[in-house]
Amino acid sequence: MKPTIMLQPGERLDDLMAEGLQIIQSDDVFCFSMDAVLLARFCSVPGRGEMLDLCTGNGVVPLLLTTRTKARIRGVEIQERLYEMATRNVALNGLSEQLEMIRGDLRDIHQTLGYGRFDAVTVNPPYLPVTTGEQNVNHHLAAARHEIYCTLEDVVAACSRLVRTGGKVAMVHRPSRLIDIVLLMRKYKLEPKRMRFVHPRVNEEANMVLIEASKDGKPELRMLPPLVVYSSGETYTDEIYRIYNGGNERDGGTQPG
Amino acid sequence: MKPTIMLQPGERLDDLMAEGLQIIQSDDVFCFSMDAVLLARFCSVPGRGEMLDLCTGNGVVPLLLTTRTKARIRGVEIQERLYEMATRNVALNGLSEQLEMIRGDLRDIHQTLGYGRFDAVTVNPPYLPVTTGEQNVNHHLAAARHEIYCTLEDVVAACSRLVRTGGKVAMVHRPSRLIDIVLLMRKYKLEPKRMRFVHPRVNEEANMVLIEASKDGKPELRMLPPLVVYSSGETYTDEIYRIYNGGNERDGGTQPG
């Protein structure tokens, strides 16, 4: 039996389409997008152990990860409003034994959480440097898009400090920044091992990249098959349907009819 | 009317399937593979000006480039046996006004050709470090696969020395080495701008990457649609048919029936 959770003005309750999970979001401060769902499906997960999600927002990635692993998962969010929403999302889904939300700054969170502690770290960081693109006047929405609280280098450095040797760091980002990402990963001893590009249609350029690195890993990259979102018009491909329906290692995925 | 060209023992004459071009090759020393054809189609070409192909082998890439550009094209090959074969391929196709083969070492060829001279440079280098994989006992074949005459860093450094500011460097390589490639490109002021992965089938990992960089370019990568080789079984996709049939900017490509 799930506890009663109060919604704040402007908030709504959405179905996460994975094992009955629900999520509070708000167009005014944060809604998850496909990026988060793909990241939560792409990343390697330990069966047990400890996982961490940085820039967690309303906690969507940790929530989805609970369908794939029994690991203890923490989410870190710097904005009070979103941290508070993420905390209610944990309670709403009755997941407080497995999930914990922490309000903190990824630039110094290792002082609380410890160096090299996590088996796997995920992050869906803001994509745009503060100097590019028009910034949303809504500060919450701007912070999700622009590197206001942390630069790409801050993010990569934090992942490297927090993950254990041999542990995994998975990130979703824009292909346009790929070269910077892999250079920073090398700089911080995170060796890219698996990469996957997301193309809206099979004959279109990629608009997202999923990348997983191993701390102190040996250089050898696997380039996975392209992940294509739409098969024709606005119809999702079978793979996207499977991902959105919570297909995972445990239940083998649900193939749409 | 084409001149009479002598074939040496073990050599054969193959059809390049592009505007009537023919090519001498030999299983004993060098045969071109799909990599070269894809590189010659992928790279940006200036309408006129000067192009250079490093590690040119029997000259397959420069030969194919003549169907796309009026630029003067030079090919550099270190092995005497292959240089000589490439020279006969130029004569065989009556292309000596546009194409010139040079025997030389890419590590010092700028002393002859000059710094920053070329509008575009292409290279299909050996893929394997000398320390990995079993080396072919045939020295010619080993040199095409393994970094015997030049390392990846030698290749990238040479491209950077030879291309002009704003000029293009296009390379085909294995995805497993992508991180090293882009790091070296950045080191030598070659900014990756276009990338394309080649997947045998749409649901398989990539086994080739095409990458084009701009000398002193601004960081901003475009990730092109995946290039898929087989549609089903051993049947090529329409795009591969078009490429093999010499489809190009000039004639718009020949679509197979």
Image (cartoon, coloured by chain):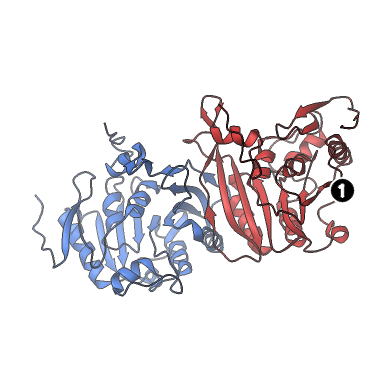
Chain colours: A blue, B red
Residue picked out by circle 1:
B102
In the rendered image of this protein, does residue A253 appear above or below residue B195?
A: above
Q: Is residue A172 left or right of residue B164?
A: left
Q: Nearer the viewer, residue B21 or B36?
A: B21
Secondary element at tag 1 = strand
Please tell me which residue is depicted at 58% across the width and 39% down the height of the picture.
Answer: B207
Q: Is residue B255 left or right of residue A108?
A: right
Label 1 marks a residue whose chain is B
Q: Is residue A122 visible?
A: yes
Residue A33 position, x and y percent, is 31, 55
- How many tags in the picture? 1
Q: Is residue B154 left or right of residue A210?
A: right
Residue A231 lies in what quarter of the image? top left
In the rendered image of this protein, does residue B51 appear above or below residue A152?
A: above
Residue B147 position, x and y percent, is 75, 46
Q: Is residue B77 visible?
A: no
Q: Residues within 10 Å of mark 1 (few under 14, many from 20)?
A: some
